[in-house]
Image (cartoon, rainbow, N blue to C red):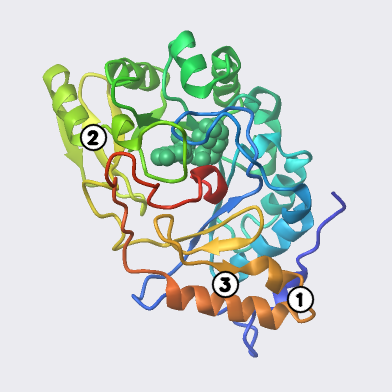
Amino acid sequence: MTEVTPRTRDRIMVDDHQPMPLVDTFQRRITYLRLSVTDRCDLRCTYCMPERMTFLPKREVLTLEELYELASGFIDRGVSKIRITGGEPLVRRDIMDLFSALGRRLGHGLKELTLTTNATQLAAHADSLAKAGVRRVNVSLDTLDRARFAELTRRDALPQVLEGIAAAKDAGLKVKLNAVALKGVNEEELPDLIAWGHSQGHDVTLIEVMPLGDVEEERLDQYLPLDDVRARLEQRWTLTDNDASTGGPARYIDIAETGGRLGLITPHTSNFCAGCNRLRVTATGQLYPCLGGAEQVDLRAALRSDAPQRELAKALEEAMTIKPERHHFRMGERGADPALARHMSMTGG
Ligand code: SAM
Ligand code: SF4
């Protein structure tokens, strides 16, 4: 990737050069962008994608320069936090160039640059990420059992993942572990996973499975309500609700015995939309104002048009008008089509 310059900076400023904040019709101010840099992945988590996943032709995916232009444009509209996601962001060639380029905007509109990763390649990149200004990473880890990991992700990669997590810690990155709670799969193991995470100094968040994309398995069979998990944890530990909010969808509880904090993301059992401050952009530049909605705006077309400044500003205004008040996730009937056809690996987690 050649040196990127913030060409978009002047494009979406109003005439007096003050950036116009992004505010939706429900008066929610958008300050957080989740940017997917690839739909590809080196794992095949059974709840995320089928073994024979069809990936996008590379030409449809935004170049690193375009991703930077887009991200920079969002920063100019008041987005202060960017999470790079995917697919697996670290499988994208030269992705560190994007981190370095965006890292240079830290302190210049951008306050936080983060990453969600499966950590298979984190050991090789942890130091560069820290150097680029990344301070925190989210790592997806659903099990500590090697055989179960291999079954769940369809790849025998737990040792690399643990190495990646250790390397991140050594590089000074704060690690948060995310685990999807799966009925009959990691259900029994979740307390041990939480205890291990906390013993390593990592926050842990549990996530309910969401009906995104076809995955070969029956969604209802995967779904484990976190209320059930909490009830089980209460038999083992002393849990106290923690009102601290990071502005995200998680609710938090403190666990006295581990001394750690546990986040719970429960799209089915509680509504986290009222304070939503985020937008998601896929690797092809499709903006999804809601993870659980079908609404979208094509930013790639805007970016590649003859008048990118005007078209991008128009597209972002449109996004503000179509961001729904709340998501409408439903698990649906057994055997029903997924609530949304697109996979999480497309929109980014
Ligand atoms: N590959 C990276 C990873 O796994 O961390 C980043 C992308 S992944 C799509 C982001 C997050 O989405 C992961 O924590 C993953 O567990 C979660 N995820 C994927 N499919 C999901 C689903 N159907 N329901 C709930 N979470 C899902
Ligand atoms: Fe890949 Fe992440 Fe999806 Fe697993 S959850 S298949 S690691 S994109």
Q: Which residue is located at x 74 percent, y 41 percent? A: 96
Of marks 3 and 2, the one in the foreground: 2
Residue 77 is marked as 3
- Extreme residue in the front direction: 335
Q: Is mark 2 within 8 Å of ligand 1?
A: no
- Say which label, 1 or 3, has the lower sequence index: 3
Mark 3–mark 2 distance (CA, rounded to whole Å): 36 Å
Q: Is mark 3 within 8 Å of ligand 1?
A: no
156 with respect to 9 (left or right): left
Q: Which residue is located at x 33 percent, y 27 percent? A: 182
Label 1 element class: loop
Q: Which residue is mark 1?
A: 305
Residue 226 is marked as 2
Amino acid, disc 1: Ser
Give whichever of 270, 147 is nearer the camera: 147
Relative to 189, is 107 above or below?
below
Residue 161 in the image: state x and y as whole percent.
56, 20
300 with respect to 247 (left or right): right
Amino acid, disc 2: Leu
Residue 346 is marked as none
Relative to 79, is 18 above or below?
below
Residue 94 in the image: state x and y as whole percent.
78, 40
267 with respect to 321 (left or right): left
Residue 208 quadrant: top left
Label 3 element class: loop
